[in-house]
Image: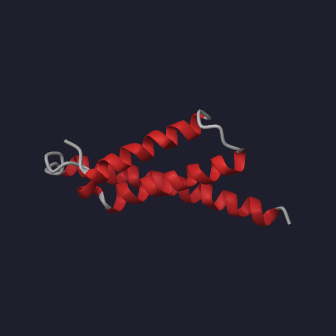
Amino acid sequence: MVTKLGLVLILFIVVGILIANGTIPLGEPMRSVLLVVVLLSLGALGLFRTREVISPWFASSRFILWILRGLGMVWLLLGAVGFLGIVVDLVGTR
């Protein structure tokens, strides 16, 4: 059983994998921006909306909740680093 927000999370993961593999034909700047958006979205959902993302059956375990929050933190940090890299690249070229 997957919640509606969990389904959105799964769709974000699939889109992120397709973008990272290069299956979706995009230019490099657009691919970088979309990958950062996907990572930030995954991180925010995983970190702040953990109980709404997973089904209530899995929410009874604190261990699973902490693992998902930890993964959300990692994805959020990766997205923030990617965002900072894009900003530095844009500002540093002038």
* Color scheme of the displayed model: secondary structure
Where is the C terminus found, in terms of image quarters? bottom right
Residue nearest the viewer, comparing 27 with 52: 27
Residue furthest out toward the front: 25
Residue at position x 59%, y 57% from top? Answer: 81
Q: Is residue 71 left or right of residue 35?
A: left
Residue at position x 72%, y 62% from top? Answer: 88
Residue nearest the viewer, comparing 37 with 75: 37
Where is the N terminus found, in terms of image quarters? top left
Residue 30: image x %, image y %?
66, 50
The answer to which quarter of the image holds residue 47 is: bottom left
Residue at position x 53%, y 37% from top? Answer: 18
Residue nearest the viewer, comparing 26 with 13: 26
The answer to which quarter of the image holds residue 52 is: bottom left
Residue at position x 41%, y 60% from top? Answer: 44
Residue nearest the viewer, comparing 64 with 23: 23
Q: Give the answer, above or below, for where 19 lies relative to 66.
A: above
Residue 14: image x %, image y %?
45, 39
Q: Is residue 5 left or right of residue 89?
A: left
Q: Is residue 74 left or right of residue 60?
A: right
Residue 61: image x %, image y %?
16, 48
Residue 43: image x %, image y %?
43, 55
Q: Give the answer, above or below, for where 75 lies relative to 23.
A: below
Q: Give the answer, above or below, for where 93 lies relative to 65.
A: below
